[in-house]
Image (cartoon, rainbow, N blue to C red):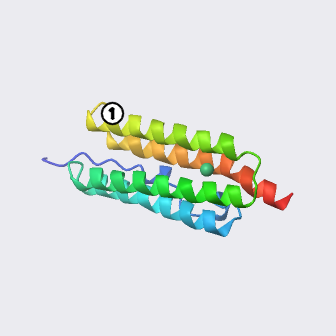
Amino acid sequence: MGQKTIYNYNQKIPEWNESLEIGIDAIDREHRFFLDLIREIEAEGVRDPGSEFIQLYIDELILYARFHFFSEEIYMKKIQFPGLQKHRELHLQLVGKLSDQVTRFQLKEIDIESIVEFLVNWFKYHTLVEDVKIARFISS
Ligand SMILES: [Fe+2]
């Protein structure tokens, strides 16, 4: 029928909600924006899987991830968080993994659905397992 393949993986991108908050406003605000950027990539993929904006939005997200990690590291330093060094290494690994995924996407080895799934899992794990340790340190 000449219809485009319609894929919908909206459900995998959670709406912002309290369970995603770590309880530090400055960090939560950035996490929320990060999730919006993932949503933007996904929406563009649904609108037009061949859109050149997908790559531009991915580049925007990479720049934002670096900015966000830098902010988080300044914050950890300010509060003298003992896990700073380890956390900084995790950030470096994440940036590396992300750039691997993006290269695979550019080579068409993986599709946009996989990249969105990767970003959501990445976001959830890092935020709820690692960033939450910063919040716990503050409240201890
Ligand atoms: Fe982090």
Q: Is mark 1 within 8 Å of ligand 1?
A: no
Secondary structure under the numbered disc 1 in the rendered image: helix
> Which percent across, then down, holds residue 109?
30, 30
Count of marks, rendered view: 1
- Residue at point 66% right, 64% down? 18
In the image, taking residue 39 as reference, residue 19 lies left or right, namely right
In the image, taking residue 1 as reference, residue 88 lies left or right, namely right
In the image, taking residue 23 as reference, residue 88 lies left or right, namely left
Residue occupied by mark 1:
104
Amino acid at the residue labelled 1: Arg
Image position of 72 with respect to 88: above or below: below
> Which percent across, then down, holds residue 12?
49, 49
Residue, far right: 140
Judging depth in this view, the residue of 117 and 99 nearest the camera is 99
Other residues around mark 1 within 10 Å, as few (<14) / some (14–19) / many (≥20) = some
Q: In which image quadrant can residue 36 be found?
A: bottom left
Judging depth in this view, the residue of 23 and 13 nearest the camera is 23
- Residue at point 53% right, 40% down? 92
> Which percent across, then down, holds residue 79?
75, 60
- Residue at point 60% right, 39% down? 89
> Which percent across, then down, holds residue 71?
57, 60
- Residue at point 80% right, 60% down? 138
Q: Quadrant of the C terminus?
A: bottom right
Q: In which image quadrant can residue 10 be found?
A: bottom left
In the image, taking residue 86 as reference, residue 62 lies left or right, namely left
Residue, far top: 109
Image position of 45 with respect to 33: above or below: above
Judging depth in this view, the residue of 136 and 19 nearest the camera is 136
